[in-house]
Each structure stands twice: as structure tokens, then as C-alpha cells.
Image (cartoon, grey):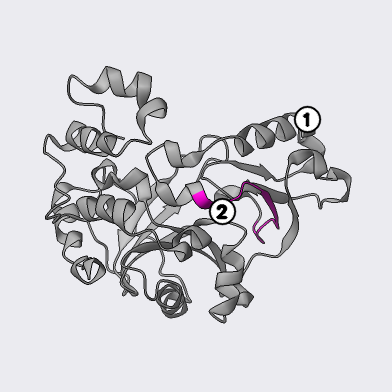
Amino acid sequence: MLPFRNKFGFFLRRNMYRVANLDWFDGMKYKNYTGKKLDLKNPQTWSEKLFWLNRYWQPEIKSICADKYRVREYVEKKGLSHILIPMIGHWNNADEIDFNSLPNRFVLKCAHGCGSNIICEDKSSLDIEDAKRKLNKWLKVDYSTFHNEKHYKKIEPSIVGEEFLPVKTWADIIDYKIHCFDGVPMFIATNFDRDPVTLHSHAMVFSPKWERIKCLIEEENIPEMQRPQNLDELVRTSSILSEGMPYVRVDLYSIGDKLFFGELTFTPSGNLIMVDYTLEFDAKMGKYIDINKLKQ
């Protein structure tokens, strides 16, 4: 992640959770990373247009798709129920969970935010009371205030339990993040060798035809990744799920020849694309978001 660059850095670090629900904070945050004024009257870059969408494009379907529980119904309506990870439960708070009835490996995640997951690879080593404390703490968080991501405000906090993916360890999972613009998959960001505690992972970016794209701020000198055997299905599925959306990132897992649904993300990195991607790529991708038709 890029460091805070200007005189507002200290203020932002100390006060971001108190002021992030204010629209003016978007402009301060954007200028802090780019040195430029956020232009929402005539946005051009990918990042600027994401900020515009966050402020002016808030249909109900956006909150439904960001809800890790209700999105399952959306996926089913798209005829893709076969890619949903089997659910083992849905609860309003952690005290309702009967951990004795859960399988040995599972994932618990809060439906209304991000990064609030309990990844259990071996229940015998899980600190259940600590897991319950974390979940109940996360349920009280209003994630819409973190980066002024308005669609999170409309999501009812709850806990979703899913089966563990059919892999040996969490580190074996490759996360395919397909960035789609108006239903068209434009590129695939991969995350692999993810640490289950820090969530740090390695990353590479490819075209839908699996051609390497050098667009990350920190390009790692790592061997080329093997093309997934179901790449065509992965791209086609992301197109179906992103239909009618000016922009959405479709997260999928591919294990063998089978796809699994992860989530839909509308505001990656709190709309600060330049955290991960170059300014040149930010400008290039901005051309693929047409906000003019949303203004009508």
C-alpha cells in the first residue's frame, strides 16, 4: 500500500473512521494519494468514476449483491446456483452458533462488510470463545463509514457459515478477481499463497485470454501462473454476474475444473485504485465506465 503523502496524512490516520461518512472526505483521501483534486463533475479515471458511482449510483441491487447472504439469491436467479459454496448456517449473532454441530473445517463471515472472516481449518485448534467475540464485535461495525461506501449501510448484519473449499489448506486457494465493466470482463487479477492470518498474498494480472498484463505498482518477479483449465467458464460466469453493472469485480475460485463463487465487490480498495494499480492503468480503465447513461 502506498504511504500517505501529504500534510493531511497524520490527520487521516487518526480520524478516518470518524469522518469517512462525509462526502468531502472522498476528495481529501483522493488528493492525498494522487496530489490531484477529485473531479466528480467530469470524472475520467477508473478511480474517479468509482467515487462518482459510490455517490450517485446506489440502486437496491448494489446492496443486495454486496450482502454475502442475500447475494446467494442473486446468483441463483442468474442460473448459477451450482457455483455457490454450500452453506452450513446463517445466524444473527455468534451466540446462536452451535459449534459442536459444525464440520471440522468451515468459514464464518459477516454478511455486511469485508475482512471479517473466521477461517477454520481444524476445529480442534479453534478458540471458539475468541471467534465468537470477534464475530459479535464485527457485527457492530458499520462498514459504510470506513471509506464512505454507501451501499454497505443498507445491509443487515448477520453471519454466514460455509463449507471449507475442497483444498488441502487455505494457502492452496487461488482467488480470481475478474474486473467487469458493463458486463464485459476486462482483466483478471489473481491472488495466491494467501496467509489466513494477515491475508497477504501474491498477485498477478491477466487478460481474459490469459495474457500477462503489467499494471500493478509492485510487480513481483515470480514465474508465470498456469492458465486455469476452465478459463472460458470463469470469464463467461463473471459476464453473467456483472450484467447491467457499470462496474463490479466478480471474485471466483477455480479448483480443478469446478468454479466456486466468492463475492461481488463494487468499491475495491475504497475506490483508491492507485493503491494497487498504476496511474496509467487507472486512466486506461476509466474509459470503460460510461456514467453518462446513468445521469439520464
Residue 33 placement: quadrant: top left
> Closer to the N terminus: mark 1 or mark 2?
1
Name which residue lies at 81% across and 53% down.
103
Q: Is residue 156 left or right of residue 144?
A: right
| Residue 217 location (% of width, % of height) | 23, 44
| Residue 193 location (% of width, % of height) | 49, 47
Contact between labelled residues 2 and 1, with CB atoms less than 8 Å apart: no
On whether residue 145 falls in the magenta region, the answer is no
Front residue of 259/30: it is: 30
Badge 1: residue crowd in 10 Å (few <14, some 14–19, many ≥20): few
Residue range of the region highlighted in magenta in the rendering? 154-167
| Residue 154 location (% of width, % of height) | 51, 51
**From the viewer's perspective, is the residue at label 1 or at label 2 nearer?**
1
Q: Which residue is tagged 1? A: 129
Q: Disc 2 on helix, strand or loop?
A: helix
Q: What is the spatial separation of the Cα atoms under label 1 and label 2, in whole angstroms?
A: 27 Å
Q: Quadrant of the C terminus?
A: bottom left
| Residue 13 location (% of width, % of height) | 34, 22
Q: Amino acid at mark 2?
A: Asp
Q: Amino acid at mark 1?
A: Glu
Front residue of 154/172: it is: 154
Name which residue lies at 29% across and 47% down.
221
Q: Which mark is residue 172?
A: 2
